[in-house]
Protein backbone atom coordinates (compact mmCIF):
# COMPACT_ATOMS: atom_id res chain seq x y z
CA UNK A 1 0.00 0.00 0.00
CA UNK A 2 2.81 2.42 0.88
CA UNK A 3 4.35 2.11 -2.59
CA UNK A 4 0.99 2.75 -4.25
CA UNK A 5 0.21 5.78 -2.07
CA UNK A 6 3.70 7.22 -2.58
CA UNK A 7 3.34 6.90 -6.34
CA UNK A 8 -0.04 8.63 -6.29
CA UNK A 9 1.28 11.38 -4.01
CA UNK A 10 4.19 12.05 -6.36
CA UNK A 11 1.82 12.21 -9.32
CA UNK A 12 -0.47 14.58 -7.42
CA UNK A 13 2.42 16.95 -6.73
CA UNK A 14 3.54 16.94 -10.35
CA UNK A 15 0.07 17.22 -11.96
CA UNK A 16 -0.43 20.54 -13.73
CA UNK A 17 -4.10 19.94 -14.60
CA UNK A 18 -6.29 20.93 -11.65
CA UNK A 19 -8.90 18.26 -12.34
CA UNK A 20 -6.24 15.54 -12.46
CA UNK A 21 -4.65 16.80 -9.24
CA UNK A 22 -7.96 16.88 -7.35
CA UNK A 23 -8.87 13.43 -8.67
CA UNK A 24 -5.60 12.01 -7.31
CA UNK A 25 -6.17 13.78 -4.00
CA UNK A 26 -9.62 12.15 -3.67
CA UNK A 27 -8.23 8.74 -4.61
CA UNK A 28 -5.42 8.98 -2.03
CA UNK A 29 -7.93 10.05 0.62
CA UNK A 30 -10.20 7.11 -0.25
CA UNK A 31 -7.33 4.63 -0.03
CA UNK A 32 -6.38 5.93 3.41
CA UNK A 33 -9.91 5.24 4.71
CA UNK A 34 -10.37 2.04 6.69
CA UNK A 35 -13.08 0.81 4.30
CA UNK A 36 -11.44 2.43 1.23
CA UNK A 37 -14.78 4.27 0.80
CA UNK A 38 -16.33 1.08 -0.61
CA UNK A 39 -19.11 -1.19 0.65
CA UNK A 40 -17.90 -4.17 2.65
CA UNK A 41 -17.62 -7.61 1.10
CA UNK A 42 -21.22 -8.91 1.01
CA UNK A 43 -22.16 -10.70 4.21
CA UNK A 44 -24.32 -13.18 2.29
CA UNK A 45 -21.29 -14.18 0.18
CA UNK A 46 -19.31 -14.76 3.37
CA UNK A 47 -22.18 -16.75 4.85
CA UNK A 48 -22.60 -19.08 1.85
CA UNK A 49 -18.84 -19.66 1.66
CA UNK A 50 -18.66 -20.59 5.35
CA UNK A 51 -21.74 -22.75 5.05
CA UNK A 52 -20.23 -24.67 2.13
CA UNK A 53 -16.83 -25.09 3.82
CA UNK A 54 -18.50 -26.53 6.92
CA UNK A 55 -20.74 -28.78 4.79
CA UNK A 56 -23.89 -27.30 6.30
CA UNK A 57 -25.67 -26.34 3.09
CA UNK A 58 -29.27 -27.39 2.42
CA UNK A 59 -32.34 -25.96 0.69
CA UNK A 60 -33.66 -24.34 3.87
CA UNK A 61 -30.40 -22.52 4.61
CA UNK A 62 -30.13 -21.37 1.00
CA UNK A 63 -33.68 -20.02 1.07
CA UNK A 64 -32.93 -18.09 4.26
CA UNK A 65 -29.93 -16.47 2.57
CA UNK A 66 -32.00 -15.52 -0.47
CA UNK A 67 -34.55 -13.76 1.75
CA UNK A 68 -31.91 -11.12 2.45
CA UNK A 69 -31.75 -9.86 -1.15
CA UNK A 70 -34.46 -9.87 -3.89
CA UNK A 71 -31.70 -9.73 -6.52
CA UNK A 72 -30.43 -13.11 -5.32
CA UNK A 73 -33.88 -14.66 -5.40
CA UNK A 74 -34.42 -13.33 -8.93
CA UNK A 75 -31.08 -14.74 -10.10
CA UNK A 76 -31.81 -18.19 -8.70
CA UNK A 77 -35.30 -18.28 -10.24
CA UNK A 78 -33.89 -17.08 -13.57
CA UNK A 79 -31.27 -19.84 -13.54
CA UNK A 80 -33.77 -22.52 -12.48
CA UNK A 81 -36.16 -21.58 -15.31
CA UNK A 82 -33.57 -21.58 -18.07
CA UNK A 83 -33.80 -23.65 -21.26
CA UNK A 84 -31.95 -26.44 -19.45
CA UNK A 85 -35.26 -27.45 -17.85
CA UNK A 86 -38.43 -28.62 -19.61
CA UNK A 87 -40.84 -27.13 -17.08
CA UNK A 88 -40.81 -23.84 -15.17
CA UNK A 89 -40.81 -23.76 -11.39
CA UNK A 90 -42.72 -21.13 -9.43
CA UNK A 91 -41.36 -21.74 -5.92
CA UNK A 92 -37.99 -20.67 -4.58
CA UNK A 93 -37.56 -24.08 -2.91
CA UNK A 94 -38.18 -25.74 -6.28
CA UNK A 95 -35.65 -23.43 -7.91
CA UNK A 96 -33.00 -24.21 -5.29
CA UNK A 97 -33.60 -27.93 -5.70
CA UNK A 98 -32.71 -27.69 -9.38
CA UNK A 99 -29.36 -26.00 -8.85
CA UNK A 100 -26.32 -27.78 -7.43
CA UNK A 101 -24.81 -26.49 -4.21
CA UNK A 102 -21.62 -25.40 -5.97
CA UNK A 103 -23.65 -23.45 -8.52
CA UNK A 104 -25.66 -21.89 -5.70
CA UNK A 105 -22.35 -20.77 -4.20
CA UNK A 106 -21.41 -19.21 -7.54
CA UNK A 107 -24.74 -17.46 -8.00
CA UNK A 108 -24.90 -16.03 -4.49
CA UNK A 109 -21.26 -14.91 -4.58
CA UNK A 110 -21.54 -13.30 -8.01
CA UNK A 111 -24.90 -11.59 -7.63
CA UNK A 112 -24.26 -10.30 -4.11
CA UNK A 113 -21.00 -8.68 -5.28
CA UNK A 114 -22.68 -7.19 -8.35
CA UNK A 115 -25.63 -5.87 -6.38
CA UNK A 116 -23.80 -4.35 -3.42
CA UNK A 117 -20.38 -3.35 -4.72
CA UNK A 118 -20.29 -2.60 -8.45
CA UNK A 119 -21.73 0.92 -8.64
CA UNK A 120 -20.25 4.12 -10.09
CA UNK A 121 -22.54 7.18 -10.52
CA UNK A 122 -23.22 8.12 -14.16
CA UNK A 123 -21.23 5.15 -15.47
CA UNK A 124 -23.88 2.42 -15.67
CA UNK A 125 -22.82 1.17 -19.12
CA UNK A 126 -19.18 0.88 -18.02
CA UNK A 127 -20.21 -0.95 -14.84
CA UNK A 128 -22.36 -3.41 -16.80
CA UNK A 129 -19.44 -4.12 -19.14
CA UNK A 130 -17.04 -4.63 -16.22
CA UNK A 131 -19.42 -6.98 -14.45
CA UNK A 132 -19.91 -9.06 -17.60
CA UNK A 133 -16.17 -9.21 -18.20
CA UNK A 134 -15.59 -10.30 -14.60
CA UNK A 135 -18.13 -13.13 -14.91
CA UNK A 136 -16.53 -14.41 -18.11
CA UNK A 137 -13.06 -14.33 -16.49
CA UNK A 138 -14.41 -16.15 -13.43
CA UNK A 139 -16.10 -18.86 -15.50
CA UNK A 140 -13.01 -19.48 -17.62
CA UNK A 141 -10.66 -19.40 -14.62
CA UNK A 142 -12.73 -22.00 -12.79
CA UNK A 143 -12.87 -24.10 -15.96
CA UNK A 144 -9.08 -24.00 -16.27
CA UNK A 145 -8.72 -25.06 -12.62
CA UNK A 146 -11.29 -27.78 -13.16
CA UNK A 147 -13.51 -26.97 -10.16
CA UNK A 148 -16.97 -25.47 -9.80
CA UNK A 149 -16.28 -23.88 -6.40
CA UNK A 150 -12.76 -22.47 -6.06
CA UNK A 151 -10.77 -19.36 -5.18
CA UNK A 152 -9.98 -18.91 -8.90
CA UNK A 153 -13.66 -18.15 -9.53
CA UNK A 154 -13.73 -15.45 -6.84
CA UNK A 155 -10.37 -14.09 -8.06
CA UNK A 156 -11.81 -13.84 -11.56
CA UNK A 157 -14.88 -11.97 -10.32
CA UNK A 158 -12.70 -9.48 -8.44
CA UNK A 159 -9.60 -9.18 -10.64
CA UNK A 160 -10.65 -5.72 -11.86
CA UNK A 161 -12.17 -4.42 -8.62
CA UNK A 162 -9.42 -1.80 -8.26
CA UNK A 163 -10.91 0.06 -11.22
CA UNK A 164 -13.96 0.72 -9.07
CA UNK A 165 -12.07 2.92 -6.59
CA UNK A 166 -10.34 4.83 -9.38
CA UNK A 167 -13.50 5.68 -11.29
CA UNK A 168 -15.44 6.48 -8.13
CA UNK A 169 -12.79 9.04 -7.28
CA UNK A 170 -12.81 10.37 -10.86
CA UNK A 171 -16.55 11.11 -11.04
CA UNK A 172 -16.78 12.95 -7.71
CA UNK A 173 -15.52 16.28 -9.04
CA UNK A 174 -18.80 18.17 -8.42
CA UNK A 175 -18.17 21.84 -9.28
CA UNK A 176 -14.44 21.39 -9.66
CA UNK A 177 -12.83 20.62 -13.04
CA UNK A 178 -13.22 17.01 -14.13
CA UNK A 179 -10.04 14.99 -14.61
CA UNK A 180 -8.93 14.29 -18.16
CA UNK A 181 -10.37 11.01 -19.43
CA UNK A 182 -7.04 9.83 -20.85
CA UNK A 183 -5.34 10.52 -17.52
CA UNK A 184 -7.94 8.51 -15.57
CA UNK A 185 -7.61 5.60 -17.99
CA UNK A 186 -3.80 5.78 -17.69
CA UNK A 187 -4.00 5.67 -13.88
CA UNK A 188 -6.49 2.83 -14.07
CA UNK A 189 -4.26 0.71 -16.30
CA UNK A 190 -1.22 1.34 -14.12
CA UNK A 191 -2.72 0.95 -10.66
CA UNK A 192 -5.94 -1.06 -10.70
CA UNK A 193 -4.32 -4.38 -9.76
CA UNK A 194 -2.41 -2.84 -6.83
CA UNK A 195 -5.53 -1.08 -5.59
CA UNK A 196 -7.48 -4.32 -6.08
CA UNK A 197 -5.07 -5.99 -3.65
CA UNK A 198 -5.76 -3.28 -1.08
CA UNK A 199 -9.49 -3.82 -1.43
CA UNK A 200 -9.17 -7.60 -1.10
CA UNK A 201 -6.99 -7.17 2.01
CA UNK A 202 -9.49 -4.73 3.54
CA UNK A 203 -12.22 -7.31 2.92
CA UNK A 204 -10.19 -10.02 4.64
CA UNK A 205 -10.15 -12.35 1.64
CA UNK A 206 -7.83 -15.33 1.34
CA UNK A 207 -4.19 -14.79 0.38
CA UNK A 208 -4.60 -16.74 -2.85
CA UNK A 209 -7.36 -14.35 -3.95
CA UNK A 210 -5.38 -11.26 -2.95
CA UNK A 211 -2.32 -12.48 -4.87
CA UNK A 212 -4.31 -13.44 -7.97
CA UNK A 213 -5.89 -9.98 -8.07
CA UNK A 214 -2.57 -8.23 -7.64
CA UNK A 215 -0.47 -10.38 -9.97
CA UNK A 216 -2.83 -11.49 -12.73
CA UNK A 217 -1.06 -9.16 -15.17
CA UNK A 218 2.34 -10.62 -14.21
CA UNK A 219 1.70 -14.11 -12.86
CA UNK A 220 5.33 -15.22 -13.15
CA UNK A 221 6.16 -12.77 -10.32
CA UNK A 222 3.37 -13.96 -8.03
CA UNK A 223 4.22 -15.56 -4.68
CA UNK A 224 3.99 -19.33 -4.88
CA UNK A 225 0.84 -19.61 -2.76
CA UNK A 226 -1.18 -17.69 -5.33
CA UNK A 227 0.77 -18.32 -8.53
CA UNK A 228 -1.62 -20.91 -9.98
CA UNK A 229 -4.69 -18.70 -9.51
CA UNK A 230 -2.79 -15.69 -10.86
CA UNK A 231 -1.91 -17.65 -14.00
CA UNK A 232 -5.42 -18.92 -14.67
CA UNK A 233 -6.90 -15.44 -14.13
CA UNK A 234 -4.24 -14.03 -16.47
CA UNK A 235 -5.19 -16.54 -19.18
CA UNK A 236 -8.92 -16.13 -18.54
CA UNK A 237 -8.58 -12.35 -18.77
CA UNK A 238 -6.96 -12.58 -22.22
CA UNK A 239 -9.62 -15.05 -23.37
CA UNK A 240 -12.45 -12.85 -22.04
CA UNK A 241 -11.13 -9.75 -23.81
CA UNK A 242 -10.70 -11.78 -26.99
CA UNK A 243 -14.24 -13.17 -27.07
CA UNK A 244 -15.69 -9.72 -26.30
CA UNK A 245 -13.84 -8.35 -29.34
CA UNK A 246 -14.90 -11.30 -31.47
CA UNK A 247 -18.53 -10.81 -30.43
CA UNK A 248 -18.28 -7.23 -31.74
CA UNK A 249 -16.64 -8.38 -34.97
CA UNK A 250 -13.34 -6.70 -34.08
CA UNK A 251 -9.86 -7.91 -34.97
CA UNK A 252 -7.91 -9.38 -32.06
CA UNK A 253 -4.68 -11.29 -31.62
CA UNK A 254 -5.76 -12.89 -28.33
CA UNK A 255 -5.86 -16.41 -29.73
CA UNK A 256 -2.36 -16.03 -31.17
CA UNK A 257 -1.04 -14.67 -27.86
CA UNK A 258 -2.41 -17.70 -26.01
CA UNK A 259 -1.12 -20.13 -28.65
CA UNK A 260 2.41 -18.71 -28.47
CA UNK A 261 2.72 -18.98 -24.68
CA UNK A 262 5.36 -21.53 -23.74
CA UNK A 263 4.50 -24.16 -21.14
CA UNK A 264 0.78 -23.33 -21.18
CA UNK A 265 -1.30 -26.39 -22.01
CA UNK A 266 -5.08 -26.59 -22.04
CA UNK A 267 -7.86 -27.16 -24.55
CA UNK A 268 -7.95 -23.67 -26.05
CA UNK A 269 -11.07 -24.15 -28.17
CA UNK A 270 -12.99 -25.48 -25.19
CA UNK A 271 -11.90 -22.52 -23.06
CA UNK A 272 -12.96 -20.05 -25.75
CA UNK A 273 -16.31 -21.84 -26.08
CA UNK A 274 -16.81 -21.51 -22.30
CA UNK A 275 -16.06 -17.78 -22.58
CA UNK A 276 -18.45 -17.21 -25.50
CA UNK A 277 -21.23 -19.07 -23.67
CA UNK A 278 -20.62 -17.08 -20.48
CA UNK A 279 -20.72 -13.79 -22.40
CA UNK A 280 -23.99 -14.75 -24.09
CA UNK A 281 -25.49 -15.75 -20.75
CA UNK A 282 -24.42 -12.43 -19.20
CA UNK A 283 -26.04 -10.49 -22.04
CA UNK A 284 -29.25 -12.49 -21.68
CA UNK A 285 -29.32 -12.04 -17.90
CA UNK A 286 -28.77 -8.28 -18.13
CA UNK A 287 -31.54 -8.02 -20.74
CA UNK A 288 -33.86 -9.96 -18.42
CA UNK A 289 -33.04 -7.58 -15.56
CA UNK A 290 -33.80 -4.56 -17.72
CA UNK A 291 -37.09 -6.09 -18.86
CA UNK A 292 -38.08 -6.87 -15.28
CA UNK A 293 -37.25 -3.31 -14.15
CA UNK A 294 -39.30 -1.83 -16.99
CA UNK A 295 -42.32 -4.01 -16.23
CA UNK A 296 -42.22 -3.28 -12.47
Image (cartoon, grey):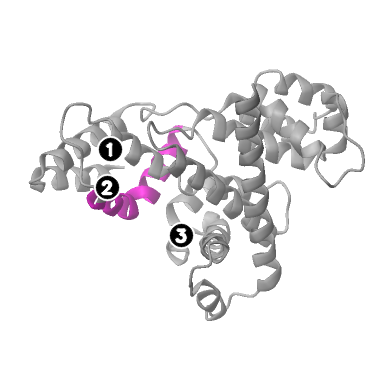
* Marker disc for residue 232: none
The answer to whether marks 2 and 3 mark residues whose Cβ atoms lie closer than 8 Å is no
Q: Categorize mark 2 by other alpha carbons within 10 Å: few (<14), some (14-19), many (20+).
A: some
In this view, 163 is above or below 30: below
Q: How many numbered callouts?
A: 3
Taking the spot 23% from the left edge, 32% from the top edge, the residue there is 26
* Marker disc for residue 170: 1
Marks 2 and 3 sit apart, C-alpha to C-alpha, by 26 Å
Q: Categorize mark 3 by other alpha carbons within 10 Å: few (<14), some (14-19), many (20+).
A: many
The quadrant where residue 239 appears: bottom right
Please, what is the dominant secondary structure of the magenta stretch?
Answer: helix
Q: Secondary structure at mark 3?
A: loop
The residue labelled by disc 2 is: 184
Is residue 268 inside the magenta stretch? no
Q: Residue furthest right?
A: 86
Q: 195 or 1: which is nearer to us?
A: 195
The residue stretch that appears in magenta: 182-202
The residue labelled by disc 3 is: 222
Would you say 30 lies left or right of 53 here? Answer: left
Amino acid sequence: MKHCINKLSALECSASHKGNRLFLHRLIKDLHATDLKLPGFPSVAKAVDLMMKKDRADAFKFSKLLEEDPALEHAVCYQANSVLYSRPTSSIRGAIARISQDNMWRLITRVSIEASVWHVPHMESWVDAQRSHAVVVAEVAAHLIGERRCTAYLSGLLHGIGRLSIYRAAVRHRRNPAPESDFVIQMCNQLYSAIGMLIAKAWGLEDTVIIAIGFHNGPSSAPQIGKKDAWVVHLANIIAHTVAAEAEGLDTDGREIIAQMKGVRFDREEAFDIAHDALSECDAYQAAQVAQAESA
